[in-house]
Image (spheres, grey):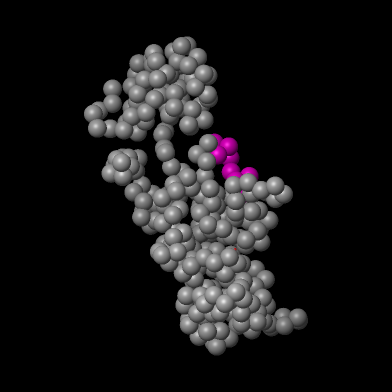
Amino acid sequence: MSAKGRSTQRLDKVLSNMGYGSRAELKKVVKQGGIIVNGSPAKDPGMHVDPYHDVIEIEGEKILYKEFVYLMLHKPPGVISATEDMRDRTVLDLLDKSYLIYEPFPVGRLDKDTEGLLLLTNDGKLAHELLSPRKHVPKTYEADVAGRVTEEDVIHFSQGVTLDDGYVTLPAELSILSVEELEDGPLSKISLIIHEGKFHQVKRMFEAVGKKVVYLKRVQMGELKLDESLPIGSYRELTAEELTLLGKPSTPELLENQKNREI
Ligand code: URA
């Protein structure tokens, strides 16, 4: 019952991709009359449906289809920004298994000890756009730096800093938020906007001026800001507004239109 021109897929494929069981299991559910499409029991698990427009119910539950998932994680320290690791817990270990079926991956990397904004998605195109070195998507960090960060450092960072391997960074915007005098010396709180993402870049930029980052948190990537009400270690789906900030259309219809344009 899908309108001509709409994108259709096999019913069992749509449902198995969403974690409702294997194709063999779904075949049984169909046989028992447990899947209803647009008000009528499905007879053939291979029937074609338009998952965005056809109303599909499985065992009384109406499915809300989505191809892509976009999650904002407030990354805690101690987990690795990877999909698997032999030794350590990864950011995927923090997700409910209902999200794992979408096979999300982290967009870029934060060090194990870095906290803050990490986007997880299965939308490879968006990830590429955010990470492409040519796009210079700004990333904002807040850090505690052992030592006194000075106005000279601000000027130095604005001109680009030479890292330990000789690479000269793009100009970066450093702001000194405060300098506290502690027993073991000054501690500076700073914010830094960088326009690239070299390995350990923020830490290495401060090392280049003889200072050590002792705490690091990412608070913004492009236009997307960390929701500070999100407890550390938790995550949520991006809102429609946040998706728009990333340049993504936010309704299933718009997503589908975009997909059709790409074909
Ligand atoms: N720069 C770093 O040094 N570490 C991070 O995790 C991110 C940016």
The answer to whether residue 177 is visible is no
Q: Is residue 241 left or right of residue 70?
A: left
Residue sitting farthest toward the bottom = 152
Above or below: residue 247 compared with residue 62: below
- At which x and y percent is residue 9? 37, 28
Above or below: residue 12 compared with residue 124: above
Residue sitting farthest toward the right = 183
Q: Quadrant of the C terminus?
A: top left
- At which x and y percent is residue 19? 52, 30
Q: Is residue 176 left or right of residue 78?
A: left
- At which x and y percent is residue 241? 38, 53
Choose top left, top right, bottom left or bottom right for residue 147.
bottom right
Residue at x 48%, y 32% (from the top left corner): 18
Q: Quadrant of the N terminus?
A: top left
- In the rendered image, residue 99 lying in the magenta stretch gets the answer yes
Above or below: residue 232 compared with residue 31: below
Closer to us: 96 or 68: 68
Q: Which residues are magenta?
A: 91-100
Residue sitting farthest toward the top = 32
Q: Is residue 202 left or right of residue 37?
A: right
Above or below: residue 55 compared with residue 145: above
Total tally of numbered discs in the picture: 0
Residue at x 49%, y 63% (from the top left corner): 220
The answer to whether residue 97 is visible is yes
- At which x and y percent is residue 29? 49, 16
Residue at x 45%, y 64% (from the top left corner): 133
Main secondary structure along the magenta-highlighted residues = helix
